[in-house]
Structure formats: C-alpha cells, structure tokens
Amino acid sequence: MALISVMSAKGSPGATTSAMLFAALWPRESVLVDADPMGGDVALRLPSDEGTPLRTDRGVLSLMPLARRGLAADVVLEHTQIAQGGQRVLTGLGGPEQAQAVGSLWDEIGRALGELPGADVIADVGQAYSRSTHLPLLKRSHTVICVVRPQVTGIVHARERLGALRQALIGPDGQSPAVGFVVVHDVQDQRETDSTARALLHAHDWLVDFGSLAEDPPAARMFDGLPVRRPERTMLVRSGREVVARVHSTVPSPHIYPAATDHLPPSADVPAKPARKGLRRRGKADSGPAPEGVTVPPFESQSDAAVDAAIEAAMTAAPEPSQPPPPAPAVGQGETRQSRRTASRLPTVQANPAPEPTHEPAPPPESATPADQPPAPPSGSRRLRKSSS
Ligand SMILES: Nc1ncnc2c1ncn2[C@@H]1O[C@H](COP(=O)(O)OP(=O)(O)OP(=O)(O)O)[C@@H](O)[C@H]1O
Ligand SMILES: [Mg+2]
C-alpha cells in the first residue's frame, strides 16, 4: 500500500517523533520504518511489546542482505517487531557507515515497503536532500513530508532543501511523490505558524500544507518510552489526528479498504477481532518485480562483491542484544495484540496513577469528539484551541 516518508531539512525539528505519532494514529494498519541513515532512534526510544529492548539486528539491517535478491512482502514483515503500544516497527541502521555501505539497496527496500499488502508504511527518513544515500527510498514514496520548526533557520533550510529535492524526486516517468510540510508549532503563537506556511508556499506552490503539530514536550515524552497520562487527550495527539487525516487523504486507497473502525478498541463485551488476512504470511508470488514504469535506477551503483562485503561488515558490527531476544513476532500477531489495546498504537497507554503536574488538559465537553473516534476530516483550520482539550 502507501509509503509515506517523514523527513527534516536540518536540525532536529521532530521528524522521528512525528513519524512515530503518524504511525500510531494512522487509520489503517501501519508499519513504522526507521530509515534514518544517520542511525535509527526508534529502537532506542521504545521497548518491545514484551518490555524487552527492540532488536537492532532485526530490521532494515537484516533485510539488506536479502534485498539484493528482491524482497517479498512476507520477508519484510518477518523482520518487523511489535513495539510498546502495539505498533509494528522495522528498526533502523546503526549509523551512516552502514547506510552508505548498502546504498544501492534502498531502492529495493523502498519498492517492497510501498507494496506491502494490507499495511501502509510511515518511514522516518531523517535528514534528506537531493543527494542523500537513501534518495531511492524517497523516490518510491507516495508522499514526502518535511517537518519544519517556525524559526527563520528552519524555514530557510526547508525551503532550499525541498526546492532541490523536488527535482531529484522526479522519476523517469515524470512522476514525483507529493511533497509537503508539517509545522511543529507553539500553540500560543499561531501567527508564527501561519507565516511559516505562507513562506514555504510562496517559494514552492507545489508544496502540500499538511497542517501543524502542537509543540507539546510533556506529550512527546511518550515517544521516549516515558509514561504520559491519557495521551489521547494531549494537544500533540489531537493535532496529530488532524494532520494524519490530511496526509491519509492524499494516499491511494487499496482495492480492499479495511474499515476505519478496525482500530477502535473492542469494548469489554465485544471479543477482539482476529488478525486480518492482509498481514498474514503470504507466498513469494505476492511480491513480484516493480510494476512497469516505476523502476528507478539505483542511486549508487556498487558491485555485488562490494555490497556483500559491506553487508557482512555491517552485520558483524551489529550490536548483540544484551539479553536473549524474544522470538520475532509471527505475522499477524501484532494485530491481535493491538486489537486488544486502543484505537491508536500510542506507545504509552498504561495508566499512571500519579497526576501529571502540568499540561493535562481538562476533559472534553460532552459534544467533543471522543478520542477513540476516527480522525476528524481536515478542517482547514490550523488553530488548536486549548480550551477544547
Ligand atoms: N511536537 C513536539 N512537541 C514537543 N517536543 C517535540 C515534538 N517533536 C519533537 N520534539 C522533541 O524534539 C526533540 C527532537 O525530536 P526528534 O528526535 O523527533 O527530531 P528529529 O528531527 O528526528 O531529530 P534527528 O535529526 O536528530 O533525528 C526531542 O527531544 C523530541 O522529544
Ligand atoms: Mg530523528
């Protein structure tokens, strides 16, 4: 299904946090892919569903040797793990050395991720520019979203990087992913957010304005594995739902469209749904060659021997988990767990009896949309009213 890449231009505006949020709130099944060439963060931030560390030797790194021969969807899914909260995750690389070594394989990884049956992929691609090692992955994306902070430096770097990137993303068929931005904004300063959007759109009228995410440090802690009480009521999640609705409206719909209610939690007297067929193990025949017209030549051509050597070095250097890792989750296992959890796959859903000292918004009024409803349709308004929390 769809591959959505979340990037930054410079600095650390919140690409990883935003990608984790989008995946958690995505209205269809999703796989969060840590594809930051500078080194994966997700495995460092979240534990597994079992409470053990997510394995870094099972993810993009372990897929690389297989990518040379073509990746079947079931193989990709077998290399994913389930993170705290039920999110399916493909953990990232150790750093730029590994990313560089396997540069020619990003295209095959991107192709496979964009064709996963029954799940959309949200990829944290970290900082990206027109000559990034992993540019082929971005080219395979349906949508590329740049996370921007509303400071002059953030705006200028985003404007320049996106301008150059746009040209580099155009494929041989003339097609390019939809490219847009999200502003991480201070809810107290709406003008700054609006002027950021205006400045970017003025420079590049092809950009898509996907809205804004609240700058909400207490809530962002949930993506560091820290407890956040009632995360679904935080400004971060509420703003995230609006952005996700906008992004989701731009991606292609599959022929078989899972009902949005599939992510609603089963109520106490309703049994959990079984895992859907979409993520069950499938035969290799499901993953054929790239469709005609979308073949993208490798960005960096390397000989097989060179790639072999690089992969072997990367695999040898992969850190061993400190304790025996849990068995890889069976395909479909995550959905069963997830269906017993919440409407989203927010990582911190366990109750924290101690009240948070700050930030906890008041309960929503009776008329407010419950947090476990599907995302509201795009409203066009970028403003978040604190009083509605
Ligand atoms: N919406 C947000 N509200 C509050 N804090 C945020 C938000 N998004 C990100 N942050 C914080 O900003 C810091 C950087 O975030 P993050 O790691 O997601 O950025 P990044 O762009 O992925 O950075 P890097 O390029 O280093 O990987 C983190 O401390 C994170 O908690
Ligand atoms: Mg990051």
Image (tube, rainbow, N blue to C red):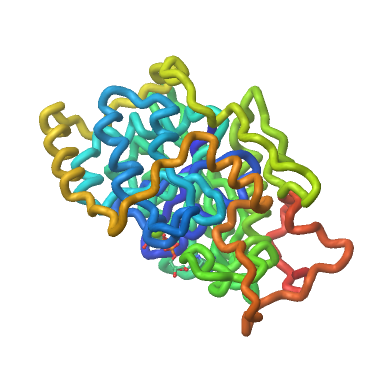
Judge by depth and name the residue closer to the eye, 42 or 171: 42
**Image point (64%, 23%), residue name:** 255
- How many numbered discs, if any? 0
**Image point (43%, 57%), residue name:** 158
Judge by depth and name the residue closer to the eye, 358 or 303: 358
Residue 11 point in image, percent of width and height: 37, 64
Q: Is residue 195 something that shows in the picture?
A: yes
Quarter occupied by the N terminus? top right
Image quadrant assignment for residue 238: bottom right
Q: Is residue 178 something that shows in the picture?
A: no
**14 versus 373 height, above or below:** below
Residue 362 point in image, percent of width and height: 76, 75
**251 versus 325 height, above or below:** above
- Residue 64 is left or right of residue 208, and the answer is left
Q: Residue furthest bottom?
A: 357
Residue 243 point in image, percent of width and height: 63, 53
**327 versus 385 height, above or below:** above
**Image point (59%, 46%), residue name:** 337
Judge by depth and name the residue closer to the eye, 322 or 4: 322
Image quadrant assignment for residue 48: bottom left
**Image point (15%, 39%), residue name:** 312
- Residue 235 is left or right of residue 303, and the answer is right
Quarter occupied by the C terminus? bottom right
**218 versus 366 height, above or below:** below
Judge by depth and name the residue closer to the eye, 334 or 11: 334
Residue 115 point in image, percent of width and height: 48, 27
Ligand number 2: quarter of image: bottom left
- Residue 158 is left or right of residue 267, and the answer is left
